[in-house]
Image: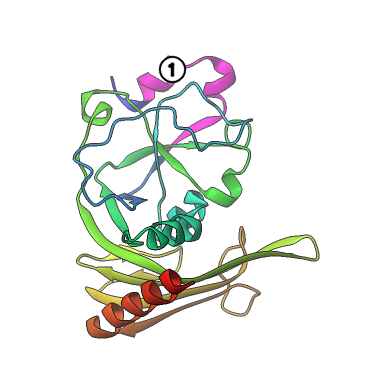
Amino acid sequence: MDLRAWLQTQPASIRNGLKIVDMPCAYHISTNPNIRSFMPQVGSRQLPTENRTIPRVCCAATLADAVRGHAAVAGQATNRWKTGQSGTFYIYQFPFREYIAPNRAIVPDVDVTKELWVVPSDPTTACFKAPIVGEFFVQSVSEEFEDGVQEHEFTLLIKTNVPVTLNERLKLDSYGCVEFKREGAINAPARPNGHVIEEITPVKAEEYAEKLAALIRNVTRG
């Protein structure tokens, strides 16, 4: 069954809140570097008002959206460092060309998470493998409200072995390491002269390793 046929099997109340989008690939992040296969399921980290009937694997069109959609990157990294584990996140690249995009009736915070779904529409999506194309760690992150607007600032150190789309405007075309910084409203697009600021700065592999080691030392001491 293709994705369009699968969509027709859903109740109208759900089907009307979903659409099919074309993407060259999508990204999923995890602290687990050994995911052998992905299987769509109803998870445990959704909002109470979010749909809990459709099995899915959440992903995003860009790495920045995957980080925001995860919603617990900084906390999860810190907790793992404090218990002597790696705080590194691994970037999995999904191979499909079409994904399900829910609307706010299905996922109330989708304007922030920008999440896409892989659903079990046929055997190729019911259980699938995906390669790791890079990794990153969180150097800093903060969230606050200013004049009723949620502000989000984070700095990631990223290492990739293939081109990775960081956000709507920026793509890491060359392999290597970069620092990626984003400041501004969490659900706003990046604008060169607007409130949202996004920067990419190349870093050397040795600097990446040194900053990761230093961050782990500082967190474990705290």
Compared to residue 97, the image places residue 184 above or below, namely below
In terms of depth relative to the viewer, which is nearer, 222 or 63? 222
> Where, by quadrant of the figure, is residue 171 drawn?
bottom left
Residue drawn 53% across the image and 49% down it: 113
Q: Residue furthest right?
A: 147
Q: Position of residue 156 (x, y in %)?
A: 42, 71
Residue drawn 21% across the image and 47% down it: 34
Apparent side of residue 180 relative to residue 16 in the rendered image (left or right): left
Residue drawn 34% across the image and 30% down it: 40
Compared to residue 55, the image places residue 159 above or below, namely below
Apparent side of residue 23 relative to residue 144 in the rendered image (left or right): left
> Where, by quadrant of the figure, is residue 110 drawn?
top right
What residue does disc 1 label? 8
> Where, by quadrant of the figure, is residue 109 drawn?
top right
| Secondary structure at numbered mark 1 | helix
Compared to residue 148, the image places residue 131 above or below, namely above
- Amino acid type assigned to the residue bearing label 1 in the image: Gln
Highlighted magenta segment, given as a residue range? 4-20
In terms of depth relative to the viewer, which is nearer, 142 or 103? 142
Residue drawn 58% across the image and 36% down it: 107
Q: Position of residue 141 (x, y in %)?
A: 53, 68
Apparent side of residue 46 relative to residue 54 in the rendered image (left or right): right
Q: Residue furthest front?
A: 221
Residue density around tag 1, few if under 14, some if 14–19, many if 20 or more, within 10 Å: few
